[in-house]
Amino acid sequence: MKYVIGVDLGTSAVKTLLVARDGTVAAEASREYPLYHDKSGWSEQDPEDWVKGTIDALQALVRESGADPADIEGLSFSGQMHGLVLLDADNRPVRRAILWNDTRTTEQCREIERTLGDRLLKVTRNPALEGFTLPKLLWVRQQEPESYAKARCFVLPKDYLRFRLNGQIRMDLSDAAGTLLLDVAGKRWSDEVLRAFELPADLCPPLVEAGAQTGTLTAEAAEATGLSADTRVFAGGADNACGAIGAGILKPGLTLCSIGTSGVVLTHEPDASADYAGKVHFFNHGKEDAFYAMGVTLAAGYSMSWFRNAFAKGESYDTLLAGVDEIAPGSGGLLFTPYLVGERTPHANAAIRASFIGVDGSHTRTHFARAVMEGITFSLNESVDLFRKAGKTVSTIVSIGGGAKNPTWLQMQADIFQADVVSMENEQGPGLGAAMLAATGCGWFPSLDACAEAFVKRAKTYRPDAGRAERYEALFRIYQQVYAQTREMNQALSAFRS
Ligand SMILES: Nc1ncnc2c1ncn2[C@@H]1O[C@H](COP(=O)(O)OP(=O)(O)O)[C@@H](O)[C@H]1O
Ligand SMILES: O=C(CO)[C@@H](O)[C@H](O)COP(=O)(O)O
């Protein structure tokens, strides 16, 4: 049997999948790594932790599957987006990576808007948001000039990981789209943006398609992982692009919901003609010449993991969420907004923070757990709502990510989104999407679409219940008021955050 590997470099962990030629997942291995929040709004990781975790996970994958390394033909990547990894002349990181959910760059975002005006949206197709890469580059240049002086090139998280496995510095278009330095429709680095900020063109790595082969494993990487040095390495893509591939979102009319650390609602765009006026992100897909639009909830799964770590440390999600299905929609009048680290869609605001509204003496921890699930899903529904208002039909949503492991949450998504929600046999869509890029690159299939026919396996469809949907519609209208009602208070409270 021949195999490929998909490596998903997530925010909470790296997840590796060994996938056989018929699309069956033969083995899985993952390793967690820490997040550093040294100050309020900061979020960093050590690139060395990604490399160690991945090598460890790959070793375990090869060892525990018993697969012959010679039969593992290709490997590709899916990665958390936007994180800035600045490299020195020897390609060593000059500081820790600043991640997608780090919001320290509000000032730099305003500077980008002032400098580029309406050209920003025209060229990069996106507004200036704290999570994107360009504001982070400007922050390091202004705040840590000694680190910036050492920097020769920047890459994104999975590009650094790939470099450590194949020795080549490259960036794929789907990830480059989230830097605010790419001419998204033209598929090239924007000279105009680089010039406007006096950034040298060679700071940007060579661009490739997500499906392009970028060499093979180095001898050292092969030795460390137990893989063969002949294993072909394919560039891979942004986790949301790969999640879309792994869920079969390869043609118009299909929508994805992913609840990982972040949460996204994403629709396929066949070309760059759609204009959402910057209300949602607009990026290059991992499928050549296609695009996607998406709304992002910054703290989706992160709200659940925060809740667990703060109030039930050490418990499994299954234990934490036991009993939530016995509580009626609305959690007994308890509402949660998931703005733990600020928000992106529909409220681009780094200063907003989360709330529980309506706490009652009768509420138990289970009410709080259900309210957290509902609040995250209401936030994602703001993106569904935005797409519907822009004229998209959203009737079937494929749901992936850690949040899709819980059947009550999947039914809740159907009831709140008022759409059929489809789960996958394997909820690890981004890793599967990465494996599909490798499988197609190895020539197993003539196209990603053909690969999807064999690899994308739907498990169950959750249909909305009319009664619950009606109740949630009323609750959603109340939920939508919380942002405006708490914005000023949170702005004032920001002075008290450390
Ligand atoms: N069994 C579960 N039930 C409900 N939610 C879960 C479960 N397992 C994981 N999650 C949620 O999924 C999140 C992790 O999802 P994952 O897709 O692995 O994230 P990432 O790609 O960002 O590392 C956790 O933060 C948690 O909120
Ligand atoms: O910032 C974004 C998308 O714009 C995030 O979706 C990151 O790409 C991280 O993803 P997860 O770790 O939550 O999968």
Image (cartoon, rainbow, N blue to C red):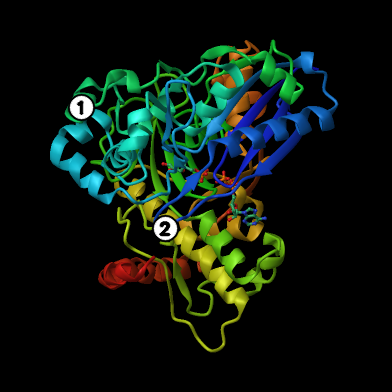
107 relative to 82, above or below:
below
Callout 2 amino acid = Lys
Label 2, on which residue?
A: 39
- Residue 92 position, x and y percent, is 49, 27
The residue lying toward the viewer, choosing from 447 and 227, is: 227
In primary-sequence order, the first of circles 1 and 2 is 2
Q: Which mark is residue 198?
A: 1
Disc sitting over residue 422 in the figure: none
> What amino acid is found at the position of numbered circle 1 in the picture?
Glu
Say which residue appears at 36% left-offset and 68% top-offset: 477
Seen in the picture, residue 337 relative to 294 is either above or below; the reply is below
Alpha-carbon span between mark 1 and mark 2? 29 Å
Answer with left or right where residue 84 lies relative to residue 326: left
Instruction: Classify mark 1: residues with Cα within 10 Å, few (<14), some (14-19) or many (20+).
Output: few
Q: Residue furthest bottom?
A: 361
SS for dot 2? loop
Q: Quick check: can you spot residue 117?
A: no
The answer to whether residue 21 is left or right of residue 75 is: right
Query: In the displayed structure, would residue 116 be above or below residue 74?
Result: below
Image location of residue 392, percent across then percent down: 36, 42
